Image (spheres, rainbow, N blue to C red):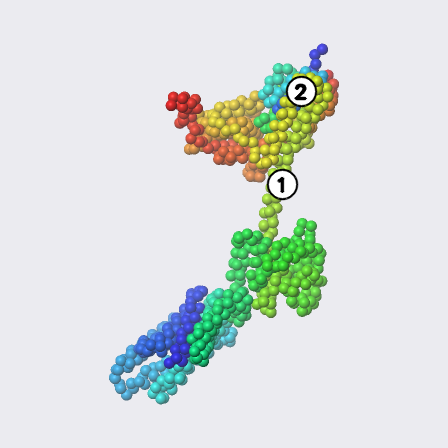
Amino acid sequence: MSKPKLLIVDDDEGIRTQLKWGIKGFDIITADSRQTAIDQFEEHHPQLVTLDLGLPPDVEGTSEGFLILTAILECDPTATVVVVSGSEVKVNSVKAIEQGAFDFYAKPIQIESLQKVLNKAFSLIK
Amino acid sequence: MYVEIISFGTSTVLFLILGLVMLTGRRDNLPKTMLAVASLVSATWSGSVTYQGFYGGLIGFTLFLEFIRSLAWFTFLLVMLRTAYKGTDQVNKNFKITFVGLSIFIIGMIFLALYRISGGSLFEFVAGNDVLIGHLLISIGGIVIIEQLYRNTSDEQRWGLKYLWIAIGAMFTYDFYLYSDAFLFQRIDNELWNARGFIHAMVVPLIGLAIKREMQWSLGNESIDIFLSRRMVFHTTTLLASGIYLIFIGFGGYYVREMGGDWGIVAQATFLFAAILILVVLLFSGKIRARIKVMIDKHFFHYKYDYREEWLRIIRTLSMQEGDKNLHVRAIRSLAQIIDSPGGLLVLERDNGSFESDERWNYEPTHVRESANSTLNRFLSEHQFVISLDEYNDDPDMYTRLGPLDIPLWLSKNKNAWLIVPLMLQDHLMGYVVLLRSPAHERYFNWEDSDLLKTAGRQAASHLAQYESAQALVSAKRFEEVNRLSAFIVHDIKNMIGQLSMVVSNAAKHKNNPMFIDDAIITVENSVNKMNKLLVRLKGEGEADKNAEFSLCELLEESIRNCTAAGTLPIPVLNCRNEKIMITADRERMSANIAHIIQNAQDATDSSGSITVKLRKADDHAIIEIADTGEGMNEQFIHDKLYQPFESTKGTMGIGVFQVREYIHKLGGQLDVESEVGVGSIFRLHIPLTLSINTAQVVSLSEHEQLKRDV
């Protein structure tokens, strides 16, 4: 039985690499920009997505992340997206949930806790 | 002869000073001008007599001047007399006739006198007496007009004018006495003639006294006040005192030489030099100057201050930069100057409510910390009085009957501390200035000083408050920058912590896997790079732009593609007019900025609306115009929020239009925004072109390389 797919969208190569080593139980696909994220999502239809909000060109903001969230949900309204962000946590978490994200994870990332969030999300959508 | 020279010399000097003083300030009324003319003509006549005493001759000229002098005084008196009557046509006509008649008479007398001097013998039986009779008639006429003027002077005006009438009347009376005697004995008495200069000189202070009493240059209802500059009075007084001093020294020197025998010349030179040295020292003494000023203010003017001048000086001192002296020192000086205080201490309210010493000027180092509830602070705050410590020490009840007041020890033990001036900002006491004792003013401190100091204290307080507000604003802006920077730093640090903690966590399971080790090294290297970037940012150096030349039209096409990749609507329509405009900039940053504006337009515009992106060239600028038919912004939003970092209508912490504008400014360009609610917005980016920008005008890089190789 094949593993469920997880799309990790983050512009930080170190985070993508370490998540690939650390997160268990998923086939991991990565993307570092809006375009690649949309392409990968359309190609692989992953069951889960972790989405960093600060992506180029708005690395210090959140506009790119929210655009990707909108695009993914427009492509598949049932997609399960866990938004990951470290800035303006309160404002962004509320906004992300409002826009259709499944959950919000506040940086800094701890492998174990993120794993639990992803497992819970996957168990709920199964 | 010497007596004549000294007598008329003194008269010359005094009338000259009077005439010059009269010419200062406004000369917008006839009586004042005529008094100046009469004084100056008198000075010229006296000068002519003095010259005659020295060198002889000039008899005819001196006689001529004496009649002109009489005419000048008559004219002044007639002009003054005319103001006593209502200026009807008939009155004016009568005065004109009188003036013309008088002028004809005096001119006739001039010719007669000149004729007699030259030996004319017509009507020999009156020769010698006719000129004397003319002088007598003139002096009698003068006395008559003075009597008329005195009668027409009201009781209120008499206080100011009586000395003027007494002075001029005395001149004519003495002339009458002189010429009566001459007529009686058929010769002008030498002693009486020599005393004439002194007599005329004596009346000048009386005229000055009348002017000092702010006489009005009219006896009727229409009056014009005389303006007498305090500075002019100060300089004149100083000059006069110096002159009198030097005359006495001259006599002293003469005496020393006569009595000194062999040492006569040496003793005289030494005496004179020492006397002049003392005079110079005295003139440069601040204390002496202050005392002269006080004396003038006290005796020559109704009010102690020329308020206009004082106010200008206060504002000048507060506003102007004087070397490295800060506003706080200048605030002390602005108050100290008013009463010639040699120094002061500024005590200001602190954030914790206490009052502490701030700056000092020529004041001994003093540490002050007063509670806001101290009786001194409460008294100053409630009554807003200037406290004179001398008055307080002499009679504490003067103050304590208004409310409790205890002078703190640090203030009472400083025997030079004199005044406490409150600095009131509206009704709030923001501090006070302690001024040191002024030797010239200490016995002469009154309500005028108090009122002026209090008002000047308010002005100083406003300046200090404005300065502190500006400082607080600068601090707030710095804090804002730090907060913004710390938000970025926290974001990056969180990422680094995440990376490194994942490395540690993963290492426990994969440490023996060479592939993981390779990835871990890459991750750590990534973190190191991030930390270096952070350090650069913390040092305020920023990330260097990767400038390169690129086509703006291509960049816009790419930006539009990126913004519509996720299917976002509306799709912007690009219009580059087929122009290939090149600019030199950081392509990535420019792309991010343009993408941001386009995304903003998409967010603000309904999918049925439209967005147009235009590129054109105007003079030495490329203009990118991004127009939408979205919801638009009102003027207040554009003014207050659009350019504020982290302000967003989308609720996100985006780079914002602020950063777009910052980058365009960095390139030497401009960002304009036009918007109307319900109609849409237009963002215009003006980006300067450089010589290498328009590819139509320059050689491309590859061609350039080819050329270099060919050469």
Q: Residue at x 63, y 22 (%)?
A: B522
Q: Position of residue B15 (x, y in %)?
A: 42, 73
* Chain for disc number 2: B
- Measure the alpha-carbon separation of dots 2 and 1: 42 Å
Furthest residue in direction top, as rendered: A1
Q: Which residue is mark 1?
A: B479
In contact (CB < 8 Å): disc 2 and disc 1: no
Q: Position of residue B135 (x, y in %)?
A: 35, 81
Foreground mark, 2 or 1, reads 2
Q: Residue at x 39, y 71 (%)?
A: B40
Q: Position of residue A39 (x, y in %)?
A: 60, 18
Q: Looking at the image, is mark 2 or mark 1 earlier in the sequence? A: 1
Q: Nearer the viewer, residue B689 or B597?
A: B689
Q: Position of residue B248 (x, y in %)?
A: 46, 76
Q: Which residue is mark 2?
A: B517
Residue type highlighted by circle 1:
Phe
Crowding at dot 2, Cα within 10 Å, few <14 / some 14-19 / many 20+, comes out as: some
* Chain for disc number 1: B
Question: Is residue B247 something that shows in the picture?
Answer: no
Residue type highlighted by circle 2:
Ile
Relative horizontal placement of residue B566, taking residue B278 as reference (left or right): right
Check chain identity for marks 2 and 1: say if they share one: yes
Quadrant assignment for the C terminus of chain B: top left
Furthest residue in direction bottom, as rendered: B185
Q: Nearer the viewer, residue B711 or B456?
A: B711
B446 is higher (above) or lower (below) than B10: above
Question: Is residue B360 something that shows in the picture?
Answer: yes
B661 is higher (above) or lower (below) than A105: below
Which picture quadrant has residue A36? top right
Quadrant assignment for the N terminus of chain B: bottom left
Task: For mark 2, give the secondary structure.
Answer: helix
